[in-house]
Amino acid sequence: MNADTPALRLSGLRKSFGRPAVDGLDLTVRRGELYALLGPNGAGKTTTLRMVTGLLAPDAGHVEVLGIDLARDPAGAKRGMAYMPDDPLLYGKLKPTEYLEFVAGLWGIRAQDAEPRARHLLDWLDLTKHAHELTEGFSRGMKQKLALAGALIHDPHLLILDEPLTGLDAAAARQVKDLLLSHVERGGTVILTTHILEVAERLAQRIGIIRHGRLIAEGTLAELRDRTRGGSLEDVFLQLTEGQTG
Amino acid sequence: MSAAPGSIRWLLGHELRLAWYGMAGGKRRPRMAGIAIGIAAYAALHAVAFGLLREPDAAAVPDALLVMPLTLLLATCATFMLSRALKACVVALFERGDLDLLLSSPLPSRSIFAVRLLGIAATTVLPYLFLAGPFANVALVLGRPGRLGLYGALAACALLMACAGMLLTLALVRVLGARRTRVVAQVVGAIAGALIFLLTQAFNLTRHDGDATTSLMGLLNGGHRFGPDSPLWLPGRAVLGAPAPLLGAVVLAALAFVLTVGRTHRFFVHGLQQAAGSARVHARPAGALRFRFRASLFDTIVIKEWRLIARDPHLIAQVLLQLVYLAPLFLLILRGDTAGPALGAGITLLCSSLTGSLGWIVISAEDAPDLLLAAPAPQRTLRLAKLAAAAMPPLLLVALPLLWLTVHTPLPGVLTAFTVTAAVLSAGLIVLWVGRPGLRSDFRARGKENFLCSMLELASSLCWGVLGWLLVALATRGEPWMPVACAAVLAAGLGILLLARLLRRRPL
């Protein structure tokens, strides 16, 4: 695999549920960057991420993950990525240790690799003292952190997160942000959607703004400011999303 | 006139509205078609009641002969009502629904508790009123207005059982704590529901000499201490509308209700608070962190499914109820009636039903389907592992009895093992192929949510059950028509499986 191969390449991606949810989306995310996908409610962000992770089949277009065509080799493409939706994918009747054992099993991780990683993740995310509790008793933040631990147990290159900071308190949000930055510093790639524009402004190297299933603007924060009349990302976002209709 | 907001009448209206929505799975109002079918069934029951009660023989039966069977019938209903009330109390305490909202409002906890208890009683009695009410109505038309006492007797019985269920559940919370109560109360509820069945089976299975019916009828002789005038049959007389017993039943139920509400409404709130924290267990020191990563994906899935089932008391109670019905069959084996065709059919039907239930839990009610889809694991392996997780418990459960049977009567034993295996695999495959995704909490409503799957499961169970009966009968007494019947039923069973495969939503 070439080091120049993008972490994610979408070309002409389309999905319709009666009306178009994603409408010919072209998007490239480079390796080692933290990319924020922004857009108003119903813009098609989650549908895009679900197609990227193989949960939805696109009506048209291609998804390439780390140079692997998702349609041709879904298992190969999935092996290098992890997905965390806004509603954590957990089992209420499992304990964190059991959940991590299960996710490691799904990704076929050997015990000798998985165990130290699981210990490290639980420790890092302050979940070790809760390791023997059922997750159904967890707070939203603890669930989110455990889902993140599950996403990282197989050390994926590409981490795809849908609203990862929703419902987290300040301390938990800080932990998650540190974890994402650390992942990128180690050469990994992160794609996230968020409604908290401050997060995108502070963390993302590039920002894509999507509306009606189309990418309407993309670039660094400075590039986006240049396109509009400047100000904060919130000003830029509102100008771009309210300035274009239909 | 509409009730004042916050009053008991207003709260009761809210409670009944929720129960009404709950009849349609809690997601919407019952559809017009469903209501129309209900009305038609209610009218049909009136027709049946009219047909039975207008017979001169029926009119001539003296009340003295009716009090005993009616008392026994009411006792049977009471056990089912207690079972249902226990389940409803567990739901009220642990699933809470709108209780957090109500208890955070300025409404007195006494009113909230009283209305919830009345709601439990009302939803408990409704099916019985639906089935038995037409007989009282028709009797009224035929000039026996006293029979309307049935309504009062059933309502009093339901209220008593709701109070008993609530007191038992709260007592369990006090003695065992909230976590254990959830399991124990549901198991007790399941056993209470099957109690009458077990007692009748125990009676049938007991070697008793002489005509039991004659002995029972002897009790009704006027001179016997258990004769018609015995206080033992007061509930039966209340059902027939005798004023004093009926008034006694109503007063007793009202007293139980008032005492239960007055004495336990605070403990109910305390129980709710305990239940809210029951999911948590004590944290252990970090050093105790232990993992058991498995090398096989198949094992990982099976262990995960079994863990999820084993930790869900609601599902355990449902499954246990099916196992309770297995008990008389095992008694049959131990008694030595090993060659009975009914045994082959019974074990086959029960294993099929159990697999269907477990299959729905494991396959259709997957908590995190997106996690499985997003993983690079082969989907075929995942599905096979889930099928195995659903099929193995019933097969393991009947393995020993089947071995016992095979050792004592080899041919019937082997034939029963064949039909059990075929039924288990068919039930699992049907759920896998045509089952729709659902939530574990909707376990009891799964039949409504996926009618096609339920019908195919039922038809398949019946086919393999009938085949179990026919094969064992063929092996033991060999009527000439039996081989043809066996072939036809086998073809039907395989045909249902083929139909499920043709209609499949998922591949294997």
Image (cartoon, rainbow, N blue to C red):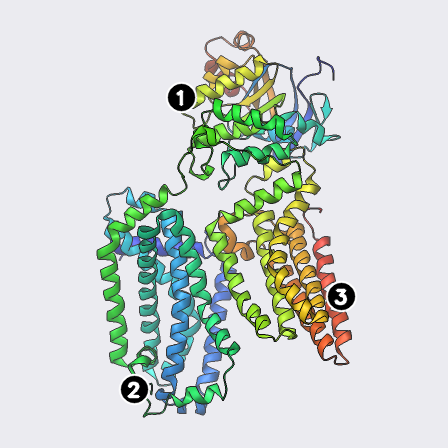
The percent position of residue A81, horizontal first and vertical second, equals 63, 25
Query: Relative to A228, does residue B347 appear above or below in the rendering?
Result: below
Where disc 1 sits, the SS reads helix
Asked whether A81 or B394 is in front, the reply is: B394
Amino acid, disc 2: Asp
The percent position of residue A106, horizontal first and vertical second, equals 63, 35
Amino acid, disc 1: Ala
Amino acid, disc 3: Ala
Residue tagged by mark 2?
B229
Q: Residue B429 bears which disc, if any? A: none
Q: Is residue B5 left or right of residue B195?
A: left
| Distance between the alpha carbons at the discs numbered 1 and 2 | 75 Å
Where disc 3 sits, the SS reads helix
Circle 1: is it few (<14), some (14-19), or many (20+) Cα within 10 Å? few
The percent position of residue B252, horizontal first and vertical second, equals 25, 69
Q: Are marks 1 and 2 on the same chain?
A: no
Q: Is residue A136 visible from the viewing direction of this image?
A: yes
Circle 3: is it few (<14), some (14-19), or many (20+) Cα within 10 Å? few
Query: Relative to B232, does residue B317 appear above or below in the rendering?
Result: above
Q: Quadrant of the N terminus of chain B?
A: bottom left
| Distance between the alpha carbons at the discs numbered 1 and 3 | 64 Å
Residue tagged by mark 1?
A170
Residue tagged by mark 3?
B491
Q: Is residue B275 left or right of residue B325?
A: left
